[in-house]
Image (spheres, rainbow, N blue to C red):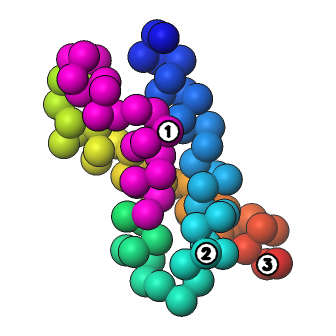
Amino acid sequence: MNFLSTLLRGISFVPAVITGIQGLFSGRSGADKKEAAMSFISAAIAMRDAITRREILDADKFKAGLSQVIDGTVECLSASAWAKR
């Protein structure tokens, strides 16, 4: 499968993953929740396989970008009516 479509499909899971993790890990720190989100989303986009196939050339930059996507999504959700539930 084309890596771009795999990446976009994985990123589309971010809001649902964050919402689920918020419920499952409500007693945990934000860092723990973010680590769980990184694990789930990395698996969803098959990051390990993409690195092996050389579709991801710089894994550290990729993880940093994914971390920013998660942070941005949390910020958007926190600013929305979702946070008021």
Amino acid beneath label 3: Lys
Which image quadrant is residue 34 in? bottom left
Q: Name the residue under label 1.
A: 44
Q: In which quarter of the image is residue 60?
A: top left
> Which of the two labelled residues, at mark 2 and mark 1, occupies the earlier sequence position?
2
Where on the picture, by quarter, is residue 85? bottom right
Pointer 3 or 1: first along the chain: 1
Task: Give the percent coordinates (x, y) of residue 54.
Answer: 21, 17
Q: Write down the residue under mark 2.
A: 24
Instruction: Tell me if 12 is positioned left or right of 46 in this view.
Output: right
- Marks 2 and 1 sit apart, C-alpha to C-alpha, by 18 Å
What range of the chain is rendered magenta?
Answer: 36-55
Q: Distance between the residues labelled 3 and 2?
A: 18 Å
The crowd level at tag 1 (other Cα within 10 Å; few <14, some 14-19, many 20+) is some
Q: Is residue 49 magenta?
A: yes
- Asked which secondary structure carries label 3, the reply is helix
N-terminal label among 3 and 2? 2
